Image (cartoon, grey):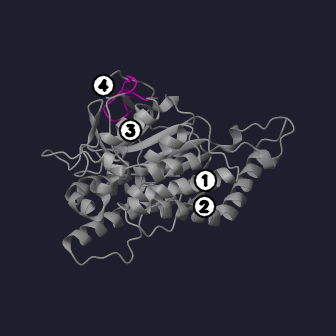
Amino acid sequence: MKNTSFNIPECAGLGRRFVFAAVTVAFAALASGCAGLGGAAGGSTGGAPIGTAGAAGSGGAGAGAVVPGPGGVAAVPGSVPGGPAGTVVLPAGASAAHAPVRVGLALGGGAARGFAHIGVIKVLEAQGITVDYIAGTSAGSVVGSLYASGLDGYGLQQMALTMDESLFADWTFGGRSMFRGEAIATWINRTLGNKSIEQLKRPFGIVATRLSNGEGALFQRGNVGTAVRASSAVPGVFSPVTIGGVEYVDGGLTSPVPVRAVRRMGADFVIAVDISTDPVGQPTSSVTDLLLQTFTIMGKSINRFELGEADVVIRPPITSGSADFGARHQAILAGEKAATAALPELRQKLAARRAGLAAVVPAR
């Protein structure tokens, strides 16, 4: 497997400040509904025993090495051979319209707003757009793990509309967090039949953040629930997750929508789904509101750099808050609406990319 860590160079400093600022604003996040991540975060120690992957230049083993250790997950951010158009060879008789384009889906974080991802997936499936790679951050890692396991959009919708989010609230007393963050991972592992990340039907990556230095990490193998828990661990709200001796927290602190991660996995056409809130018009009259607005602005600054590298960005018009699990049906519909509106752009750019690949390497 490929092993390394990744950063967004333009905002590495922002990412580090964001990690530590998140501890300060955790109570604001909880008050605003980020505690609703209890319905989209968690952890478990079950699953297949897998080592931890060292990251070159980060004190771990060199790239490509897998160091046996506890935790059940290996951190596998890193580049994938291929990607440039010149590596594509069309089969005999293939046309530009059918040139092989590896489509990646980057699912962003946003707690209960993550239900909108399901609506996007339903539209992509209805239009026959096949997703080859999936990467998820926070709530996106939850939906992404289920989608990568083989569930289709309608299966995801049925599960979303019938799930009881109260099952995922595992309060803790004392320590560094409000919640342990274990229940959701137990549920995910059970739902997926305790499959590891690499055993899922689609290539899947889960983004988390190293607490010690603010670097992003992409998990492509190991215990799904543990990696999802790490990706969703809002500092101060959910406990950091220790994997191979390294503490990880919410992936949204460094990569709110994991565009670069899914490209590193091998995608050469990326559809990004951004479910973050717009800071414009948000209240700032109280200390809690002010801290939350700061949290939102910092995330938007980081997001701006990465979303610029996506081929198509879908932004569902979600009006509900991050903890409004009662509005899950509206969120799914918002995802469908946004994806449908993006279809003309998506089709045009996908056709252009296929034509470009066909022009670089003609059919044999």
Q: Is residue 266 magenta?
A: no
263 and 322: which one is in front? Answer: 322
Numbered badge on residue 122 = 1
Could you tell me which quadrant the C terminus lies in? top right
Q: Tell whether label 2 touches label 1 (CB within 8 Å).
A: yes
Q: CA distance from mark 1 to mark 3?
A: 23 Å
Q: Tell whether label 3 touches label 2 (CB within 8 Å).
A: no
Numbered badge on residue 187 = 3
Query: Element at badge 2?
Result: helix
Query: Element at badge 4?
Result: loop
Numbered badge on residue 339 = 2
Q: Earlier in the sequence, mark 1 or mark 3?
A: 1
Badge 2 amino acid: Ala
x and y percentages locating residue 357 in the rendered image = 74, 46
Within 10 angstroms of label 3, few (less than 14), some, or many (20 or more) residues? some
Badge 4 amino acid: Pro
Q: Which residues are magenta?
A: 47-63
| 1 or 2: mark nearer the eye | 1
Query: Element at badge 3?
Result: helix
Q: CA distance from mark 1 to mark 2?
A: 9 Å
x and y percentages locating residue 10 in the rendered image = 41, 56
